[in-house]
Image: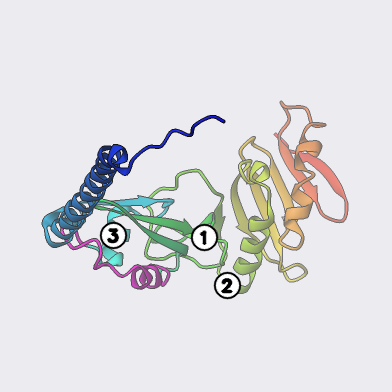
């Protein structure tokens, strides 16, 4: 029979001591790391390192960055953890131009405000200037412009809010492609037709139509104008029937 090799406990002791020492060292390093991490967090929270140094505004178009920051009540050098995100959100969403707001903290010292404005569908022309019109059917009178940017049609002579509201609803339903072709829209009501409008296009043509179902009717415009000699300008009547009336000399 083979004799089994007997290993005494004394032979194992150095290895056991070494293993215990390594385990103790690892635990000590972990505790030291946690200690310094906690100290760093406390120093960050109690010092100017956690003060707001940057306010980033995203998604704004009609509103200026400075205007949004002022309305939010945010201030530089205020503690980033002291800001009330819900209060800022509710405050900014009272602005008639703003649809939704999202406020985020980006450590160590940046606050990001994501703005979603109501869609800008046109400008109302008045004696005082041009006022943006939004897809929520509100005319933004605090944003008067001396000139328009050319990014939306100008609405003339819409003195009745009911018909202006209907026109805005139709413009909102228009595709961006068709909207970009329109320069100006005049409301020209008559006794027989209160919805009558004349639409001045960027290509020099004029569309005579009505506010009712305007978005649906205008989707035919590219097809209609493609059948007209580019050198000929006139009035395209789009209603019950569609026909072209060339300008007379």
> Is 73 colored magenta in this rendering?
no
Above or below, 7 against 120 in this view is: above
> Is 92 colored magenta in this rendering?
yes
Q: Position of residue 72 (x, y in %)?
A: 30, 65
Q: Is residue 247 visible?
A: no
User: How many angstroms separate mark 2 from mark 1 (CA)?
Assistant: 19 Å
Residue in front for this viewpoint, 162 or 101 = 101
In the image: residue 44, left or right of residue 110: left
- The residue indicated by pointer 2 is 161
| Quadrant in the picture for the N terminus | top right
What secondary structure is the magenta-colored segment mainly? Answer: loop
Q: Which of the 4 image quadrants contains residue 114?
A: bottom left
Segment tinted magenta in the rendering: 75-94
In the image: residue 166, left or right of residue 153: right
Q: Earlier in the sequence, mark 3 or mark 2?
A: 3
- Tell me the tag on residue 118: 1
**Residue at image coords 71%, 34%:** 233
Which residue of the protein is positioned furthest toward the front in this rendering?
A: 1
Q: Position of residue 154 (x, y in %)?
A: 54, 52
**Residue at image coords 15%, 58%:** 77
């Amino acid at each position: 029979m083979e004799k089994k090799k007997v290993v005494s406990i004394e032979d194992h002791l150095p290895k056991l001591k070494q293993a215990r020492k390594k385990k103790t060292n690892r635990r000590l390093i972990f505790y030291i790391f946690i200690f310094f991490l906690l100290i760093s967090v406390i120093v960050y929270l109690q010092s100017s390192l956690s003060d707001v140094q940057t306010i980033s505004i995203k998604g704004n178009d009609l509103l200026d960055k400075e205007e949004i920051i002022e309305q939010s009540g945010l201030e530089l050098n205020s503690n980033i953890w002291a800001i009330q995100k819900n209060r800022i959100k509710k405050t900014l969403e009272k602005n008639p131009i703003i649809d939704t707001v999202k406020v985020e903290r980006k450590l160590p010292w940046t606050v990001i405000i994501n703005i979603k404005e109501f869609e800008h569908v046109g400008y109302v022309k008045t004696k005082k200037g041009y006022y943006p019109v939004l897809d929520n059917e509100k005319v933004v009178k605090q944003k008067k412009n001396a000139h328009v940017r050319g990014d939306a049609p100008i609405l003339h002579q819409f003195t009745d809010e009911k018909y202006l509201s209907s026109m805005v609803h139709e413009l909102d339903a228009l595709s961006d492609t068709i909207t970009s072709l329109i320069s100006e829209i005049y409301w020209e009501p008559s006794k027989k037709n209160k919805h009558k409008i004349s639409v001045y296009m960027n290509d020099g043509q004029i569309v005579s139509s009505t506010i009712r179902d305007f978005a649906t009717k205008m989707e035919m415009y590219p097809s209609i104008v493609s059948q007209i000699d580019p050198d000929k300008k006139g009035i395209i009547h789009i209603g019950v029937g569609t026909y072209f009336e060339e300008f007379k000399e």
